[in-house]
Amino acid sequence: MKKTLLLTITLLLVLIIACDKKESGNVAFMKVEGKDIIAPDGSKFFIKGTNLGNWLNPEGYMFGFRKCNSGHFINEMLCQLVGEEATNEFWSKFKDNYITRKDIEFIAEQGANTIRLPFHYKLFTDDDYMGSKTDDGEGFARIDSVVSWCRDNGLALILDMHDAPGGQTGDNIDDSYGYPWLFESEAAQQEFCDIWKRIASRYANEPVILGYELINEPIPHYMSNKDELNAKLEPLHKRAVAAIREVDKNHIILLGGPQWNSTFDNFTDWTYDDNIMYICHRYGGAPTPEAIASYIEFRDKTGLPMYMGEIGHNSDEWQAEFVKTMEDNNIGYTFWPFKKVDNSCMAGIVRPEGWDSIVVAFAEAPRASYAELQQARPDQATSRRLLDEFVEASRIENCVPQTSYIQSLNLNK
């Protein structure tokens, strides 16, 4: 408890210093210095925290769904279950309740110092997304709230475009159409850069934000033309960095490698900007330095920081051992995810009674024809009640803290 209090006070002082400088017109930000991140007060900042996955980029498994594993699949299934109007109402309640100020307070109380916020690019467009359609999306309103909550709790914030225009993976995690069309489409690339420029323009003088993570887990390993796609990633990085630097020369920009942020040998230039760093991910495998030797070697070659943006879904013992490996090798980390059904997270959502037998069963049922759809659809009143109960169950005060999981993250050190 004393360590948690000390960490919180230290982080608050860092942010107060930054905000004081902001008020005087001399804003201080996190910055890259060699292989380290340096806080505004000049101290080394070692990232420790979690990801707010599923909130602004829904993924099926965190609801208990398997077939409906991406945002638009989930939305279509819910529309088939309860209709478009009720689905829009569900998403509105979900966004208002899944992550609130109390969640950020809980994360800070565990000793974390950083939150990574995944978001869908459509939140910054006039597209229909998660039950809303506005001229400029609702992304800024949601991020503004998190910025405020992080500031009040001494947390740094990383903005992560998890779902890019056109899709960067062609898998469920980017809510796309089965191929990374971003790398084939000039229009998608321009929209990608334009959105980041708008985000950077709004938050250029916001010291709570540690940095901008351009793109999550681009280009899966199973693409037959992955080498061709890999070669297009660094030029896109440079293009987006240039767009951001037109309006924001302050914030760190985080760059992920292809094949789920796991390979870096396609990168040849890391000198085009003086405030960039790299981000890796890892699930499974041995929790040893040898298992991430390529990440360490690339970090040492570039002389820039390396950060483990996602890790998790393993035993507590494995996680504790891997945390030590990362700490020993100066690689900060944010575990995935903060909250989901069941466990393997910091806050477990208890499924409402009947959730699996009704909502999940419908999500998994054959619906290849309208006849099958009509036969599979359960009672409307029950389905709508269960959706409301899921929202209520997802509130942090109703979640079950996963104590041993949290302890394995070593956040209080």
Image (tube, helix red, strand yellow):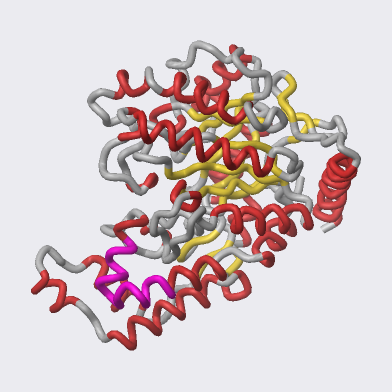
Position of 259 relative to 119 (above/below): above
**Residue depicted at x 61% and y 69%:** 396
Q: Is residue 399 above or below residue 11?
A: below
- Residue 259 lies left or right of residue 107; in this view the side is left
Say left or right for 76 vs 339.
left
Residue 37 located within the stretch drawn in magenta = no
Region of the chain picked out in magenta, as a range: 74-89
Residue that extends furthest to the front in the rendered view of this protein: 135
Task: Residue 10: tell me if it is visible.
Answer: no
Query: Residue at 30% across / 24% down in the picture?
Result: 226
Q: Main secondary structure of the magenta part?
A: helix
Which quadrant of the figure contains the N terminus?
bottom right
* Residue drawn 63% across the image and 27% down it: 246
What is the quadrant of the C terminus in the image? top right
* Quarter of the image where one finds residue 227: top left
Res 41 seen here? yes
196 relative to 410 in the view: left or right: left
